[in-house]
Amino acid sequence: VSDQEGYTSTRSPDKKIDTYLKNKPRLKTDWENVKKRIGDAIDFLRDEAGFDSSQFLTAEKTIESLSGYFERNNIRFRDLFRKRKNFLLKWLYRTIIMGLYSNTRNFEYDIKGLRDEGRFELPELNKEQYTKEGIIGVMYAIGRRNEMKDYEGKKLNWIGKEQGRRIQVDHIYPHSKLTKKPISLDDNLVENIGNKAFTTASTNESKLAKFPGEKIRDNNIHQWLEGEKFLHDKDYERMMSNRSVSRKNIKKIKKFIIRRKNNVMREIERLIK
């Protein structure tokens, strides 16, 4: 066997593999089955879990794992009972948040467990292992399940959309303004998930680095925003020139970010416990 650089191996191909590769009917049957299992995994991620893009699948090999689950249990997505769907959702969201497939980070070990027992082991919840990227990923999935919209009331999804409709993770209150003196909020607070929302690229470009004001229609976008009265750019201008106004509005922004973070985490933990 020769590789691309001309090296010749003296090792012969495994006879079983060689025989299998020559069995074209078996290859065709197995390939069709692989396509079905991958299709089941993608259908589950999109139609049940809320993921329509790999952008928010922060744990590696998620599709491979789910495909293996459907293969090992010889079941199609459309035939899953609600109890199984709920278990898979819980496993998936925990996996996304912590980047774990069980209580290890060893993908091969976890797949062996799936092969032997036909099920996933739920990762133990540990808040210290939550990642911001994972939380944002689950935020997106839950939002899509609730028909999430952007600031302008446009439905958010990746499927069949042009570049301007692609999803972006946006600061609700802009980073450039919250970290500028005399406001100077702590960067960790500005980057907190409570200050992040999903929008399309075109909406984000039109919003620019402005305080949101009334642009966010919080009554119909389903992004954990309940009756919020957002500050305008006029409020920002007053904050820059009036210290007492600045202190007062900074308190409002801090409370909003913390309140929204708590709302997000409460909803996520309801689904993964």
Image (tube, rainbow, N blue to C red):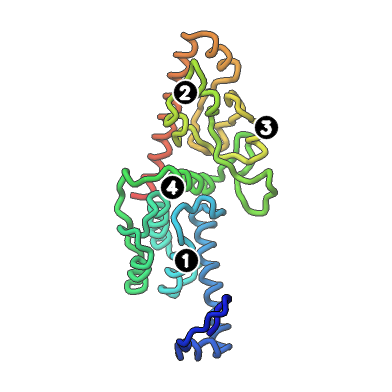
Q: Residue at x 50, y 89 (%)?
A: 18
Q: What distance separates the C-alpha of mark 2 from that of mark 4? A: 24 Å
Report if the CB atoms under discs 3 and 4 are less than 8 Å apart. Answer: no
Label 1: state its secondary structure. helix
Q: Residue at x 67, y 54 (%)?
A: 160
First in sequence, mark 2 or 1: give its number: 1
Q: What distance separates the C-alpha of mark 3 from that of mark 1? A: 38 Å
Name the residue that disc number 2 marks.
253
Give the amino acid type for the residue marked by disc 4 in the picture.
Gly
Give the amino acid type for the residue marked by disc 1 in the picture.
Glu
Name the residue that disc number 3 marks.
206
Residue 64: which disc?
A: 1
Report if the CB atoms under discs 3 and 1 are less than 8 Å apart. Answer: no
> Image height check: is 72 above or below 47?
below
Give the amino acid type for the residue marked by disc 2 in the picture.
Ile
Is 118 or 176 nearer to us in this picture? 176
Q: What distance separates the C-alpha of mark 3 from that of mark 4? A: 28 Å
Give the amino acid type for the residue marked by disc 3 in the picture.
Ser
Name the residue that disc number 4 marks.
134
